[in-house]
Amino acid sequence: MANKKSKEQTDKLIQQLNTQIDTYGNSPEAFKEYLRFMGNFTKYSYGNCALIQAQFKGANAVGTFNHFQKLGFSVKKDEKSVIRILQPIKAKIFQDKTGKWQFVKDATKEEKAAIKSGNIPTKERPVGYRALPVFDISQTTARAEDLPSEYPNKWLDGSHPLSSIVEQGVRNVMDARGITFSRKPWEQSNGVIKGIFNISERSIQLNPRNSDIQNCKTLIHELGHAILHENTKLTAPEKEFQAELTAFSVCSAYGIDTSDYSLAYLKYWTKDLKEREHLISGVEKAVKEITKAVNQVIDVEKEKWLGMNRDSVMKEFQKKVEGLYAGNYDVATPLLRQYDHLHSPYDSLDLRLDALAKMMHQETSVVADSIDRAITQIGALQASNDIEEQESYIRNENRQLQLKEEIPVVIKAPQKKQAKQVAQAYTMER
């Protein structure tokens, strides 16, 4: 049943993303924003563009050190100017009396005077080239939020509380499949590429410029390649679609939002893909394998936490249960939140204990089956007929509006011993 539910959630998530890919990037305003942003950068010649891509793959917004400073960004201290372009060296020339072109520096005194007064026109002529160091915007202090939404090769900034746990699960899958991290130094010519899976070496390499959250997503992306593409005849766009869809689906399952990056990436790689449905089945396989490993890590971490905190959690929960019994502590239940006219005396102790247990679960991250046992124990401890009648009464939705006319049932406070039993059941070992 759990596997079926997990598969349904994965299918739904993948289908939602499929729809988002089709609609992403269709905004004229977003495209105008991108054009305005790129207007801040020099339009280089075809030759220089080829040089840039050869030295730093994926570079898009390129400028000199001073140019980025004018835009409000600084080149990061640990970055080097690995990109060189050819800048023309120009000299001024003029036509002498014979119609021959001469350099201004070689003009006579009379000719220089005529040039200065504007009587002899001049123009510039390239006489050579020099290497000019430039930087890609990814080498600067610019943040992802400083870039337009349509910017290609945009990166993810920041971190996420679960990224290290998700990464550990991914590493466990890598170990099981004999995939290692490459020990080679990162080639600067890789540019803005976030990661690489080397099929022959069965290794993954990550860009040292990546943030924590970018590393997490990229590691899943490259592992997706490793799981799905070692023996396949798929095209490059089809492979990238599957790998990024795997990364997006796994990250989404744990609340790590990569949609801005993933949607732009998928939009680029799927623009020529007319049929994507046949690729999704493979994605489901990879997502299932990775999420299973991540969930195992989460279970281990929860057990570690419980081992260190079980006593304090039990005492805190027992104290709140006792306060609930004594009437000096209360907790809102779904019914109380749904019906504004209801007050706690009309709600059963059972439901309030249930709500308290769930609240404690959210606050302390205790495993769900401990909650189930706690609620079962709570139910077993409640033997009072008036509580059962009250619970049945308030669950009757047809009579909800009549509750304010009824006399509330007075709930007798159970023994302290029962409160302790409830707390112990809540923190019971698995």
Image (cartoon, rainbow, N blue to C red):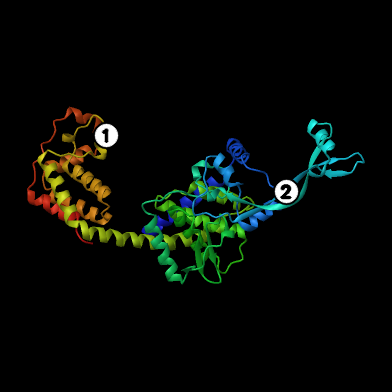
Residue at the spot of label 2 = 89
Q: Residue 148, percent across and down?
A: 55, 41
Residue at the spot x=12%, y=54% of the render? 421
Q: Is 420 displayed left or right of 102 in the figure?
A: left
Residue type of the residue flagged with mark 1: Asn
Q: Is 269 displayed left or right of 74 in the figure?
A: right
Q: Distance between the residues labelled 1 and 2?
A: 87 Å
User: With respect to residue 43, does 57 lie above or below?
Assistant: below
Residue at the spot x=84%, y=31% of the render? 119
Residue type of the residue flagged with mark 2: Ile
Between 35 and 270, which is closer to the camera in this rendering? 35
Does the image show residue 106?
Answer: yes
Residue at the spot x=17%, y=53% of the render? 312
Pick the quarter of the image with the N terminus. Answer: bottom left
- Say which mark, if any, is on residue 398: 1
Q: Residue 418, percent across and down?
A: 10, 51
Residue at the spot x=68%, y=47% of the render? 44
Q: Quadrant of residue 84?
A: bottom right
Q: Residue 232, percent across and down?
A: 59, 67
Q: Residue 85, percent across and down?
A: 66, 52
